[in-house]
């Protein structure tokens, strides 16, 4: 492979060069095949997707669940997740600057390792993002109900799922009307959310440290031992999926050589710090057992503890914004994963149609939104989170392997604007840590994840076994 130019654009089937003329259908304002998505996202848009996706679950949904499993050491679980994410974000950044195309990890793996691993990852990424988005929407439903309760409108948990479904459909429609519209919403949400969090966590940290207010009795850091720290890290890793979602919209990023690495690495660092501080503040306000008892909306009670009714409302409103931004960004990324595999003929070509009016892959958005709504209706928060983490960790490990393979071969077309420092140690550690973290997940999550991968491999054998993508740009 080394030294050989990539196959000509449009050469997907071995030995064949299909007609690459675009197909335009004026009756439904769509275009297929060679249509490209517009580059409308800048650095702020990339950071907003990364931070906005990650910040929701990590800060507003997981503290109670994580503290129940690991105690105050849940902060270490989030730190472990951040380290693994950084070990993968750096290789992903290099690959994304060499191949700034929509599809992210799927695109890199299929071009470096071949069509079968690419197909399994690409189709599994579709499902992984669907599980993650459903998880975010369920969290959104809980915070919507709590927001109404803080305003004096008691509706009960029975409306959690209907609200989640309603807004999931709404976010899908919003993304159909244009990536720029979705990005503007994302930027605004993240800016407001970060303002709320910095103010709240700043006050909470001073109180937790005993500099203001009453000093709290210290709790044993790891009351349940070391193993729960690792199992909790596997659970909360869903919180760090946002940096890879930046890569799925690489085809829509302006100046990708600069903006992609900054957006991916910057979002992991910023959010990782916020997670650790959040667990410190939350476990200082209540013991781990009490915090676990509050469940998915434990942070509301933390806000009430520090700042009374105003603090509780700030948190429920912040949680509403955070889970909203996570769901919105994930729907965007899910559709781009579907768009990418369809463009490569691993799914029917109709899934990559682009709406001429809005410049968005509206069919892919429909294929994203439908399954998301079905899973959202289950309301199974922890299972949704872990299956999403399982499928993403498989992809992350293979991304690191893909980088090593491309560096070894150095094909002529491989010319990244950013190169990973500490090569080959960083990608090797990224692969090992990603695969190892899977071993600490619940058996049910592992079974569901493996079943999805086997199903995608079966689809490849049935539908796309003659497709050859290795080396193609």
Image (tube, rainbow, N blue to C red):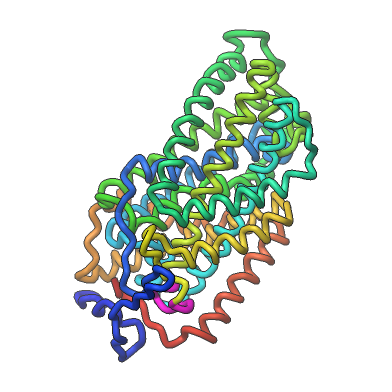
In the picture, the quarter occupied by the N terminus is bottom left
Number of numbered discs on residues: 0
Q: Where is residue 353 in the image (x, y as percent from the top left)?
A: 42, 70
Residue shown at the point (72%, 56%) measured from the top left: 377
In the picture, the quarter occupied by the C terminus is bottom left
- Dominant SS type (magenta): loop
> Looking at the image, can residue 117 be seen?
no
Of residue 152 and residue 473, the one placed in the foreground of this image is 152
Farthest-out residue, front: 27
* Vertical placement of residue 9 versus 365, above or below: below
Which quarter of the picture shows residue 437?
bottom right
Relative horizontal placement of residue 398, taking residue 458 as reference (left or right): left
Q: Where is residue 453 in the image (x, y as percent from the top left)?
A: 58, 71
Q: Where is residue 14 in the image (x, y as percent from the top left)?
A: 34, 88
Of residue 355 and residue 10, the one placed in the foreground of this image is 355
Residue shown at the point (72%, 61%) measured from the top left: 444
Which quarter of the picture shows residue 371?
bottom right
Q: Position of residue 130 (x, y in %)?
A: 58, 59
* Vertical placement of residue 431 versus 74, above or below: below
> What stretch of residues is rendered in magenta?
342-349
């Amino acid at each position: 492979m080394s030294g050989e130019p990539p196959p000509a654009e449009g050469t997907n089937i071995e030995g064949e060069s299909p007609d690459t003329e675009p197909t335009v259908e004026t009756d439904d304002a769509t275009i297929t095949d060679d249509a490209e998505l517009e580059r409308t996202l800048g650095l702020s848009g990339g950071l907003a997707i990364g931070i906005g996706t990650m910040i929701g679950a990590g800060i507003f949904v997981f503290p109670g669940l994580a503290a129940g499993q690991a105690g105050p050491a849940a902060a270490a679980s989030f730190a472990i997740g951040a380290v693994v994410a950084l070990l993968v974000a750096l290789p992903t950044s290099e690959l994304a600057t060499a191949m700034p195309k929509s599809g992210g990890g799927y695109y890199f793996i299929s071009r470096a390792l071949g069509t079968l691993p690419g197909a399994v990852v690409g189709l599994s990424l579709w499902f992984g993002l669907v599980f993650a988005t459903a998880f975010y929407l369920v969290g959104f439903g809980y915070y919507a109900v709590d927001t109404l309760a803080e305003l004096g409108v008691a509706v009960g948990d029975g409306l959690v799922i209907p609200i989640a479904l309603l807004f999931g459909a709404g976010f899908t429609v919003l993304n159909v009307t244009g990536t720029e519209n979705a990005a503007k919403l994302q930027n605004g949400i993240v800016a407001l959310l970060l303002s709320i969090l910095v103010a709240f966590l700043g006050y909470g940290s001073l109180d937790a440290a005993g500099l203001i207010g009453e000093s709290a009795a210290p709790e044993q850091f790891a009351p349940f031992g070391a193993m729960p720290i690792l199992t909790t890290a596997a659970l909360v890793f869903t919180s760090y999926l946002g940096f890879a979602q930046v890569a799925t919209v690489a085809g829509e990023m302006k100046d990708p050589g600069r903006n992609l690495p900054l957006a991916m690495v910057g979002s992991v660092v910023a959010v990782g710090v916020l997670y650790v501080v959040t667990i410190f503040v939350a476990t200082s306000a209540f013991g781990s057992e009490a915090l676990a008892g509050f469940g998915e909306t434990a942070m509301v009670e933390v806000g009430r503890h520090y700042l009374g009714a105003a603090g509780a409302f700030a948190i429920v409103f912040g949680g509403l914004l955070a889970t909203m931004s996570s769901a919105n960004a994930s729907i965007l990324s899910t559709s781009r994963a579907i768009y990418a595999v369809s463009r490569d003929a691993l799914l029917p070509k109709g899934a990559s149609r682009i709406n001429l009016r809005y410049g968005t892959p509206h069919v892919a958005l429909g294929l994203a939104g439908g399954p998301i709504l079905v899973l959202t209706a289950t309301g199974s928060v922890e299972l949704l989170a872990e299956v999403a983490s399982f499928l993403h960790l498989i992809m992350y490990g293979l991304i690191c392997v893909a980088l090593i393979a491309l560096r070894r071969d150095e094909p002529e077309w491989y010319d990244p604007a950013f190169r990973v420092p500490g090569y080959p140690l960083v990608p090797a550690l990224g692969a090992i840590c990603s695969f190892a973290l899977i071993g600490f997940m619940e058996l049910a999550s592992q079974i569901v994840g493996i079943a999805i991968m086997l199903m995608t491999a079966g689809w490849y054998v049935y539908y796309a076994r003659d497709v050859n993508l290795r080396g193609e740009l």
